[in-house]
Every structure is written in C-alpha cells, then in structure tokens.
Image: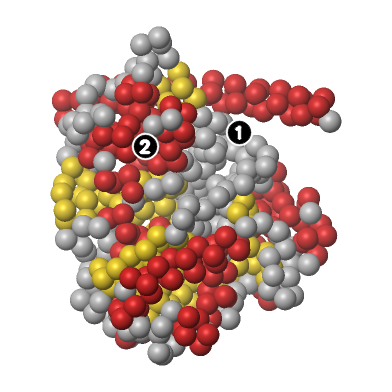
Amino acid sequence: MYLGIDLGTSGVKSVLIDDDQKLVGEQSSRPLDISRPHRGWSEQQPDLWWNAVGESLDGLAARHGSALASVHGIGLSGQMYGATVLDASDRPLRPAILWNDTRTEQQCADLEMRVPDVCSIAGRKPTPGVTATKLAWIRDNEPEVFRQVEHVLLPKDYIRLLLSGDKASDMADSSGTMWMNVAARDWSDRLLDATNMQRRQMPRLYEGTEATGQLRRELADRWGIPGRPVIAAGGGDNACGACGTGVVHEGEGTVSLGTSGVLFVAMHDARPSHEHAIETLCHSVPGVWHQMSVILSATSCVNWLSRLVKRPAAELIAELGTVINAPSPVVFVPFLDGCWSPRSDAEIRGALIGLQHSSGDEELTRAVLQGVAFALLECAEAFRSTGTSIDRLLAIGGGSRSDIWLSMVSTCLGVELRVPEASELGAAFGAARLGMIAATGASVGDVLKPPKINRTIYPVQNLAPAYSDAYRTWLSVLPEVRRVSMAASVEGSARNVLRH
C-alpha cells in the first residue's frame, strides 16, 4: 500500500492505493480557514495544516486500518509558494504567507533590480506569489521576525518536518520559490543573497521520486503502521497532479480547475518565458521541466458566488444543465485575489459588469464560469506565443466534475479535454505514486502511466465565434477594471487612515 497526502489551501486529502494503483481509501479533513487581515493578504496558521493531516490520517486509520497498516511509501503534495518561517526550535514565527498573497509588488521590483537576469536563472519574472519576495517583505516590514528566521519551508515540507524530522524539499516545489537555478536544479546563491537569505536556511533538495526520510515511530504507532514507511520528496500540487495523470513527457498537459486555475505542459528542457508571467519549473521526476500558468481564483469564484446568493455551489452549476449556450451578457472578471499569470498585476480585482434587473442566479453563474474560462484562454494564448502547442489537455481538479464548465473551457481554448477517472484526486494520487517509486525503486515509466479516460469534452464549434467575441470584450474591460480597482484601494486606505 502507498499513501498520498495533499495539503491544499482549503483542506487536506489523503488517499491509499494498492500495488496495482487502485484506490483503496480516501479521507478529507475539515475545511481550512484563511486569514485576510488586509487587502491582498492571505495567511494560514501552520498548526491548522498539521491538525488537518492528523484528522485525515486518523479517519483513514478508522475506516481502512488494515490497508493503512500495510503502507510502505508515503508521498507529499501541497499548495505551492507558501512561506513558513521557523525559529531555532523549528517553531513557526508567524502565520504562513500563502501562494495567493499579493502584498509583495515592491519586493518583486527590488529583486528584478538586484538580479536583472533573474528570469534566466529562476525561469520566470518575479511575481507577488513567490516565496523569495515574501521573505523580502518580512525583511522590510517585520525585521525582528526576519532576524529570527533559521529555516524556511514550503507548506508540505513543514508537514514533512513533523512527520519525519527532516528539513527537505523536492525540485518541483522549490523551483517555484525564485531561489533556485531551475536549469541546474539547485539553489542559486545569487538569488538567495538578493533577498538576504543563505543556503543554510534552505531545506536539502531531492528529486520528487527520492526518499527523504522515514515516518517517526510514534506516528507510525498512532496510525497502526508496524514499519516506518519511507517518505518521498513529492512535489507541489500541480506537479503531483501531473504525476497523477502521467503527464511527464514533452508536450503533454493538464488544465486544473481547483481553488486556482492552472495550465501545465511538460517539457524536456528549461525554457523560460521573458515576455509573460509564465513559470518554467522543474518537474517531480528527474530530467523533466514544465511550463505553468496560474490564475489565482477558479473554483473559489464559484464559492464566492455561492456565499453571495446563499445557495450551494453545486446547485448553482447543476441549474445550468450540461450544454453550453451563447455567452452570458454579464462580464465577470475573476481576479478576486489579483492576477498572477500571464500578466503580473497585483492591483486588479474582480468585477461584474452588465447587470440588469433580469440578472438572476443562472446568468451570474454562467458569467462566473465563463470569466474563469476566459482567464485560462489568456494563459493559453501566452503559452502559444512562446511556441508551445496546446491541442489536447487532461482536465483535473474539483471543477472538472462539471461538464458545462469544461465545455466552456474547451470551446474557448479550442482544445479537446479528456477527463480521467478520479480526476479530482489528482495531486494526492500523484503523491502516492511518487511514494511507490521511492519505496520500491520502480521506474517512472512503469508507475506514472496515463490514466483511463472517463469522458472527452470537445469544443462546440458553432459557438466558438461567439465566445471569441465575448473574450475580446472581456479583454477590453480589464484596463478600466484595473483603474477602478486601484482607485478603490486608495480610497479604502484613506478611509482606514481617517478611522484611526
């Protein structure tokens, strides 16, 4: 048996697979809270992560105890970029600053000034989500905390520390920090120095398929595991999702509809984009890299609408049926947390435009799904401008359960979407696969095979021109939405000053 643990932004999911990679059991934690104390901030307490992991594995032990007892390998996946800063006793010094936090625009400019060729080294331009600029922000705004930082770990690697006592990370997750030389697959002393950090504060680097340590004896006893399973380095959630779907060869790709929306294409060399905020990162398997573009809000936009109209998100989507119609006349801009890729714009925010008295739940839901699809199309156009071919993608993440949403994405991007079986398990399943490789020494080719396809979604050709026109309208409103977003931010800051 092999265990995959995925630490997401909204919760933890753990899965058990057997030697034939069949799903034996799965268990999710309760939802995780996110703190947003200021505009653009997004933080979580690391203790919440550990409690959620314990809750998830306790649930697996209660329901699938005999299977869990047979686990030989564990793989870790998690939300990327989060800055977990630890003191000399390995205690968190402050809440972790998450991937969708956009406070570090000034630090991004500073890093680019200090290292003009940062894109060639790190595989991308600095954007507010990356870990390096978060530490620079702490340096500039919380100097007392910064002086106490002994180690920096990514979220899933903080869980690794508590599971095994090892300060280690994988190439894929760590290459998103902007402290790595992505082509060399090693820490960059130049980039570390540019943010006043040192190599000794970084975890040891491993390929995602390698073992970094073993489960602590007391934890093995807690979950009824006689041995001490090895723990694979694993990867960030997107790389593990790709491992879960066998996307490890040149030109293969996924579109993920989770909390964030992600386009991901594997490649056999590091090809940074100098024109767009597209990431070139290491993959979780040796000798492979990938291009990735992330929109910060995808299913979280649907959840936002659900809270607004006080109806379950699944009910809102189900009300639309399964077949797309002409584009909604309401324009939705999905940048509730700002825009990270392919444009780096921390100031822009979300918007609903074109509301009428007749605008009801159904029209608003269509507008939200459509707005996310348009944001993914902007990412796809940026990929294509660099020479990347996108003809067919695997669809993963919780949003892939909605055929109407996938139909919108397929029609907008002009690509066939294949939905694998158990697609929403993506990252946790991929982590379990990496745990299998680390425990058995099996080859990547033998383990990371493509999945069985549940269904295929094709573009609706007769609606493609209408969606293309609606997309151009969507693009045209972004400059004005950005202007209003910035004005509202200034006015909000002024009101806060007056209050105090």
**Would residue 387 be visible to someone looking at this image?**
no
> What percent of the width, then of the height, locates residue 156?
51, 66
CB contact under 8 Å: marks 2 and 1: no
**Would residue 456 be visible to someone looking at this image?**
yes
Residue shown at the point (31%, 81%) measured from the top left: 66
Give the mark, 2 or 1, whose residue is nearer the N terminus.
2
Look at label 1 and name its amino acid.
Glu
> What percent of the width, then of the height, locates residue 374?
37, 32
Left or right: 255 as drawn, with respect to 101? left
Judge by depth and name the residue closer to the eye, 7 or 341. 7
Name the residue tied to disc 2: 313
Crowd class of label 1 (few under 14; some 14 to 19; many from 20; radius 10 Å): many
Identify the image quadrant of residue 197. Answer: bottom right
- Please tell me whether mark 2 or mark 1 is closer to you in this view: 2
Left or right: 423 as drawn, with respect to 94? left
> What percent of the width, then of the height, locates residue 232?
43, 77
Quarter occupied by the N terminus: bottom left
Name the residue tied to disc 1: 347
Residue shown at the point (15%, 49%) measured from the top left: 455
Judge by depth and name the residue closer to the eye, 141 or 188. 141
Residue shown at the point (34%, 78%) measured from the top left: 65
Label 1 sits on a secondary structure element that is loop
Q: Which mark is residue 434?
A: none
Please identify the residue farthest to the front as the structure is shown: 62
Look at label 2 and name its amino acid.
Ala
Above or below 79: residue 75: below
Label 2 sits on a secondary structure element that is helix
Identify the image quadrant of residue 74. Answer: bottom left
